[in-house]
Amino acid sequence: MSQKSLAGITAPARHFAVQLSATRRGARLARLLTERQLDEWGEPYEAAAQVVAELASNAVLHGRVRGRDFRLRLTLRADHTLRVEVTDARGDRVPCIPAPVEQQDTEGGHGLRIVEAYANRWGVAEAPAHGKTVWAELAMSHSGD
């Protein structure tokens, strides 16, 4: 095969998925596993680790159902877009961006602002068994690109 014909072949997406306990320890492990996996794939992980930390923390705090875990899924596409998905058991509790800080009466709701700051886009989808998946997509940047 010539060099020219190889250029048209795209690498398949890379996948990582793990089910974790819906505890603070599980949320912390989600972040650490994300860092390790992205490092193994040769990708920068700081922004993705922040997004995973927030989404996993929200899954534990707001999406927990006794006896049910949450799932972390990472998909790295050929164009270096990373899709982060965190699935929890509470489809009835859908996250939304809180009011601007100057209009808030409470301390909560800042986590999704962090997700919004790092992600190109994010959203929520229904998941099986009355759950939900909160997802975010990030363009992975390399210092040499």
Image (cartoon, rainbow, N blue to C red):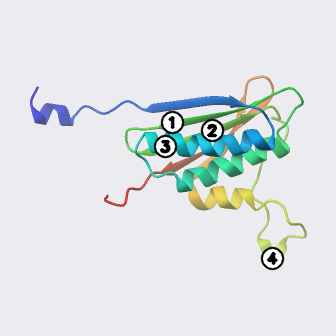
**Which residue has dot 4 on it?**
102
The answer for how far apart the CA atoms under marks 1 and 4 are is: 36 Å
**Which residue has dot 2 on it?**
85
Residue at (18% x, 32% y) in the render: 6
Which label sits on residue 75?
1
For discs 1 and 4, the disc positioned in front in the rendered view: 1
Q: Is residue 89 above or below residue 137?
A: above
The answer to which of marks 3 and 4 sits earlier in the sequence is: 3
* Tag 4 secondary structure: helix
Q: Nearer the viewer, residue 91 or 75?
A: 75
The answer for how far apart the CA atoms under marks 4 and 2 are is: 30 Å
Which label sits on residue 136?
none
For discs 1 and 3, the disc positioned in front in the rendered view: 3
Q: Nearer the viewer, residue 144 or 133?
A: 144
Q: Amino acid at mark 2?
A: Glu
Where does residue 16 sit, x and y in percent of width and height?
A: 54, 31
Quarter holding residue 26: top right
For discs 3 and 4, the disc positioned in front in the rendered view: 3
Where does residue 18 sit, x and y in percent of width and height?
A: 63, 29
Q: Amino acid at mark 3?
A: Leu
